[in-house]
Image (cartoon, helix red, strand yellow):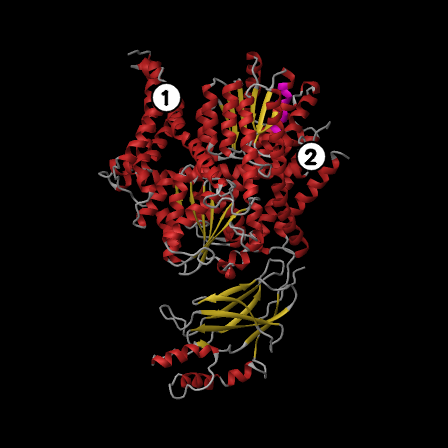
Amino acid sequence: MAVQVSWTKEVPVPQTGPRLGVRLAPFAMLVVLASAHPVLAQGTAAPDTVLADSAAATGDLVPAPPRPPSGLTVKDVTNDAGRALDLTWKRSPDDEPGQTLVTQYRLERAPTPGGPWSVVDSASAGSEGRADQSVERNTEYFYRVTAVGPGGVTPALSVTGPVRATSQWINQTRWSVLILTVLFFGFVLFFISQAQSGKVPFVRRIPGIDAIEEAIGRATEMGRPVLYVPGILDIDEIQTVAGLVILESVARLTAKYETPIVVPVTYPIPFTIAEEMVKSGYLHAGRPEGYDPNSVRFVSPEQFAYTAAVGGIMLRDRPAAHIFMGAFYAESLLLAETGFETGAIQVAGTANVHQLPFFVVACDYTLIGEELYAASAYLSKEPKLVGALKGADFMKITILFLVLIGCILETAHIHVLTNLLQTQ
Amino acid sequence: MKREFPLMITAAVGLFMILSFFVPHQLVSVPADFLQQSAIVVVAFGYVLGGANALKLNAETVYKRNPGWIYKLILVVALVSTVEIGVAEGPGFLDDGKRSRWIYDQLYSPMAATMFSMLAFYIASAAFRAFRIRTVEAGLLAIAALIVMLGRVPIGDLATSWLPTSLQLPTLQEWIMEVPQNAAKRAILIGAALGVMATGLRVILGIERSYLSGED
Amino acid sequence: MLRFFENLDRRWLFLLMGLLVLLPLLFPLALPLTVSPRVRNFHDAIAKIPDGSTVLMPCDYDPGGIPEMVPMTRTALKQLFDKNCKVVVICLWNGGPGLVDRVVRSVADENHKVDGVDWVNLGFKEGREAVMVVMGQGIANAFPRDYKGRDTRSLPIMKRVRDYSSFPLLVSISSGYPGTKEWVQQVQSRFHLPMVAGVTAVSAPEYYPYLQSGQLLGLLGGMAGAAEYEKIRDEKGTATRGMDAQSMAHVFVAICILLGNWVQWRKRKGGTA
């Protein structure tokens, strides 16, 4: 249901006020020029000719007001909620690079062709368009644009309208994203239902995730705790969600092996979720009494304060296993190197590509990018989660084909696919 | 209902926000804008929750004289005094001459800069200790790393300025960064983005529900 | 000698690194710099905007990013002030506003620019991407008060600023999250605001795809990028002075990689010194 009104009708300036002004415009110019004459410049000067008076007093030549712009068109901005109208015009003939006859353009708006007019915006010299974003939806407006310069203002030649800003139901430029999103959702839901009906897809071995149990086992043998760091970002970051989900599986293992776990957290909301995850892990392992409320610690949202605190935990408590799962930034190497010095086994996973090299160098195992998101499915082996993983993989294959086909078409200067997939 | 109700809210709001990306109409965009503005308020209140929790946990450790209590005492004193001074000084608390400004310039700023600069030392020790060439791929990686590291600084330019332009370190470095690195980066980004969508979809549809406590 | 390197205490490496960074700062080598196309494009993108425009400049960093971010901020501000552009500064990092205000204020004072008229620091707002989106509805909606607590709408500089359409360019100087990537995703993609960015060296490669797609018009990568930018502007700022130290540090790390592998290779061969 697209309701789009696009009016570019120029209406003659109505009988009152502006039209009279238009008829008299040439004479107005003569008056202005005449008023520059030291003898003729008697009486009250109009505000726009103050400059002319002072120039007349010193004998300087006064520039004429700039010629007005023309060709004003006003269109509804599409794919929005009816909040804006787009104005375009042809510059004043006096608006040339290097010239100063035009300093700005004034955009005026009124509910009727006769006014009352109000200035809604201005644009610098050289501009040929502006969006008016102060409109009310489904309200008719008339527009005119005037050029302003040192010589004054010449009234607009014509008025454009009526124009109305309307809202649209669908953003037409995002069809390709919608189709691909629906396709993605379709893949995921299809493979989830397949997995639930017994056809659980194969998931390749991810050594980093297998190493988590090995690391926890090592900590148990050494009688030392496990340190789990769920990244440094807040819950709105999906990596933090993924890290906290893996925490539940890790907590289950530590509960099973009766190994203490320490979870320092940066933000308050992940802190409360981390508490629930650890509690849930102990519950599912059948050891709810083993849960230590002090195992999850809120530290600080400040990056390096958090890093210093975790470094302190590593050097004082000497955990035997460090598991870093989530979003990391500059502190990744600080944590990993400090951890290495304590002799702990370290497993890391992040989708922040620029930190991967540091983890790869300093940790025993590293999960790269999407492996972090696959970890929860891999650890739990739950059909729904594994099915979702396969759905995402199918989407990757689709994108792969689109990239290949797109490269071939672009090489042949055929832009059909690129144009189809363009979005705003 | 204890688990179902939050899942229903998550699903409804999550799907609505996805819808708002495709539907610009005011019936969808106005509530979506309101939700986004509300998110700012909720996150801001989260700091109150976090601060109170930090105070509670650390004050308990100090009171019980648990190991490391002296550090917790310093933390509590720093937290309380910084907040009190900032509140007392009001707007403009970071203007020149204010105590909060002194705390920021003389304590916070040097400490943050110091922690960040430790990276330089750790990179050297990690490079010496751990960057081992055991396979062909690792060898290629090491060569690329050396070219990029030296090509990005003036000394690399100086050392190879006598070579033809196409063989100079900065040119090689530029090619490595623009072509193979870019391609690999894009691939990982696409994969990670799909992972984000899949995880988000699982949370929205309630397939991923382990963040809610209790039995499945 | 092999045994010495096998058992090398890493604190010797730290000491050497410290000296190699400190000495060039005290005794500059003045190594020549070559300007890369990315940095030139950053400069040119700012040069092309009309004189007197108002530019949005998010400075998303904290004291940890001083060596890389502050030189970029200073040089970009100077270029903008030379064009009589007005600058609206914000900061989405909670540890950054004090530092950013000091940097912007010092450059503004050097260039005789008036706070509230030629530039304004709107300060910090919590919310990350949500703030970026709310700014699209109105800058003053997201920042009703500036850093000094003044009513934003009453400031002369803000009279002609409504939302992103009021700016011809966005200059993002950021050292992490939230930062340039979020500005590209939330603002450049949605509002088509031309954008240039200055980022840390470690994260610069992440933005090359955005450069290639045209979403970023120019990019400064780390202190090297800042030094190249200073060279274009004929300035000898802290980034230029720091490049000698960075060169030495890079060479040292390269030597550490080679030395570490030499030690491993000799061990495998079974040789002992």
Choose top left, top right, bottom left or bottom right for residue B58: top right
Image coordinates of residue C39 in percent, x first then y, are 36, 47
Can residue A147 be seen in this snapshot? yes
Q: Judge from the rendering whether residue B3 lies leftward or rightward of residue A19; answer left or right.
A: right
Can residue A205 be seen in this snapshot? no
What count of labels does the image hold?
A: 2
Image coordinates of residue A183 in percent, x first then y, are 62, 43
> For the view shown, which residue lies furthest in the right direction?
B1
Is A251 colored magenta in this rendering?
Answer: yes
The label on residue A193 is 2
Number of the front mark, 1 or 2 = 1
Task: Check disc 2 and give the amino acid type.
Answer: Ser
Front-most of residues A9 and A393:
A9
Front-most of residues A375 and A100:
A100
Q: Is residue C103 above or below residue A5?
A: above
Q: Is residue C253 above or below residue A181?
A: above
Tell me where the magenta segment starts and ends, as one range.
A245-254
- SS at mark 2? helix
| Quadrant including the N terminus of chain A | bottom right
Please tell me which residue is depicted at 60% across the width and 34% down the height of the picture: B51
Distance from the alpha carbon under mark 1 to that under mark 2: 57 Å
Choose top left, top right, bottom left or bottom right for residue C126: top right
- SS at mark 1? helix
Image coordinates of residue B96 in percent, x first then y, are 45, 45
